[in-house]
Image (cartoon, rainbow, N blue to C red):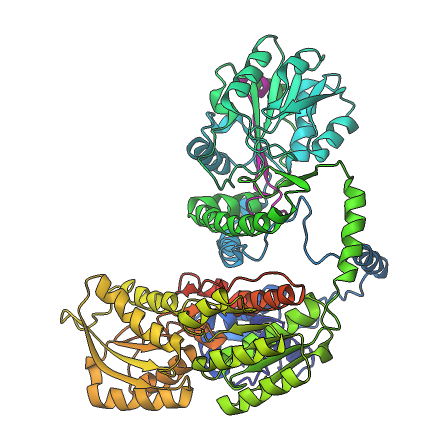
Amino acid sequence: MELMVPIENKDSIPLYEQIYRYIKTEIRAGRLRAGSRLPSTRTLADNLHVSRSTTQLAYEQLLSEGYIEALPCRGYFVCQIEELVEVKYHGVPEEKEEKQEENENYNYKVDFSPRGIDLDSFPFNAWRKLSKNTLVDDNKDMFAVGNAQGEYSLRQVIRDYLHSARGVHCRPEQILVGAGSEYLLMLLSQLIGRSTGIALENPTYKQAFRVFESLGHPIFPVSMDEWGMKVKELEKTQARIAYVMPSHQYPTGIVIPIKRRQELLKWAKKQEGRYLIEDDYDSEFRYKGRPIPALQGMDDSQKVIYMGTFSRSIAPAIRVGFMVLPEPLLALYREKAGFYASTVSRVDQNILTHFIIEGYYERHLNRMRSVYRGKHDTLLAGLRELEPYFEIGGEYAGIHVLLTHKKGISEKKLTETAAQAAGTADVADKKVGISIYKFDDNFMTLYRQELQRYLTEDLGFKPENVVIQDGKGDQAEQTNQINNFITQKYDVLILNLVQASSAPEITDMCKEAGIPVVYINREPDEAEEQRWVDEKINATYVGCDARQSGTYQGEEILETETKGDINGDGKVSYIMIQGDPENVDAQYRTEFSVKALTDAGVEVEELLKQRGDWDQAKAQQIAQDALNQYGDKIEVIFCNNDAMALGALQAIEAAGRKVNEDIYLVGVDALTEAVQNVIDGKQTGTVFNDHFSQAKAAADAAVQFISGEEVDAKIPVDYIKVTNANAQEILDKLK
């Protein structure tokens, strides 16, 4: 049986779900009858031009719901569905209405809430894979009641991680796993007794205060100096427990130095029953110097209760926290609270265990440190101009900073003032003229779509005031468009030049008219960019350094099993399919892809270098002719962009060659089809020319010009190397 499933790559619904929905609908409508044999996942994938994993996911969903069955050695068949139950959801209007009201009251462009983290970088694919692996082979144990303290395997890996990363000394038996720090604090309250006084740093983490207060504990606020909680003031209270955040105090950002930590430990040692609660909530993120080891690691008297969480380092929905109890409290826990069942499912615990063991957590932390460091640096750079009015505290660690107004103006007043200022800086009526070198370029299509979306939806420009025109690959045509923008007195121009060499002429036209210009994608030469600085011209270039993209292409070849030398003759023989040789991106990608090989000591042989003009059809012909002429001698095909790589792939397959087996193929841009090819093994690698970040940076620069702010002559955006290891993650982002 052949299934013609109507799928749409641009649809927001995942491909596997589109396939699943179609087959389900056909079965329920009776068009696919009970007992009918379905095509194999491989056959369906080939027919629909999707990956086999996509069709497998669709079939697995249909299997789980009972619409189809898998018979050994025979295939997939439609089930009898009379007895199937379909649950229809009609929505909950009250909840929807409540959410709408919330959005109306809190209409912010940037989420600066304390619980806000970057979810765009969450490793969904790894988590999905581990979730699937946890439930294979009918792993019934996952659904049985587990250890009250948490799975022993998870506690073991937490112990190992804490020891290596934070200097914490403990046994797995001392660790309690629970659904968030609030639950663990409530559990701790059972052990210490609700009459026990608790000292809190002032100011402190509001949620901890709320928990202790709701449980009836006497609360003793203790003021702070630049080194943390004042121990002399603590001594004067009746508190037996002190709740502190030594590594990055919330909200001040203070990192408690060694001397003050020793004073706190000394206070705890003075009396029986005194303890320190160390909340180490975001110690993973530090951007300057080495992290100070945990307070618990300095404790030789079993006086520190250590608490941590994965909610900040992974995601808020991962409600997994942990608490390390001193030995005396561990015995008390088993006596008073050992009967409480674990509040974290065994499934989630198992996923997290393997997430850590298999190295995903470490890689995720490294990636997030980089992400947050970039955001941290950007935020601080933006805040520096406020230093005459605000003191900035808590920088260089964690995922928040503290601003304190030097004249003591309240947060409420500052918020109101900011809202008023935002209203006066409205860009809705400002006009943005955009010219793209040609609309039928695959990458620039993605770029201009995101640019238009960001300008109108995120920044608030009226759609009719954002005009995008097609340069049609003709510089004269494009120059005429720019003249029209100038005549119509547009407020700012964003230009993707047909010829980068035209930049001086166009810059002078815009300068004379008093219109700032943002160049994108095709970079003017360094002399022109320096002229902007010297003459204080309102012009900037936003884009990636093409040298980086070329280098990444070469590295992708070096990372293959043979380092590009498939035939083992001691050198890498390649053909190079260029874009426009006059384009600096084409020049750099051509040069630096090969340079990466030679810098690594690899001998190379250029068989052919030919202009493909960024065009798929031209590249196919070039590759076809080269394969006919040089045959198996060609080991690598370098393409300056993915459109040409797609054309080269057509020629490779027509010649009976197989990528990654007897030839390597790399491109640039990370087009959706190209990334899917990397996943499927039909392309060795590509380089993500991050149009999302570029479009945002270009639009933000345009707004800065409109607002009269100074803009750097060059705003760089990094490329991202795409290999089989991260291709699915990139594809999810693109979709």
| Image location of residue 122, percent across then percent down | 54, 54
Q: On the image, which quarter does residue 587 sit in?
A: bottom left
Q: On the image, which quarter does residue 583 sit in?
A: bottom left
| Image location of residue 617, percent across then percent down | 40, 90
Residue at the left extreme of this rendering: 569
| Image location of residue 250, percent across then percent down | 64, 34
Between residue 712 and residue 400, name the one nearer to us: 712
Q: Residue at x 62, y 14 (%)?
A: 274
Q: Residue at x 46, y 69 (%)?
A: 531
Between residue 658 and residue 258, name the one nearer to us: 258
Between residue 385 and residue 403, name the one nearer to us: 385
Q: Quadrant of the C terminus?
A: bottom right
| Image location of residue 276, percent across then percent down | 60, 20
- Magenta-drawn segment: 308-330
Q: Is residue 284 positioned above or below 424 on the image?
A: above
Q: Is residue 597 left or right of residue 460?
A: left
Q: Is residue 474 positioned above or below 63 on the image?
A: below
Q: Tell whether position 418 is magenta.
A: no
Q: Tell whether position 316 is magenta.
A: yes
Between residue 425 and residue 197, name the one nearer to us: 425
Question: Is any atom of residue 93 visible in this view?
Answer: yes
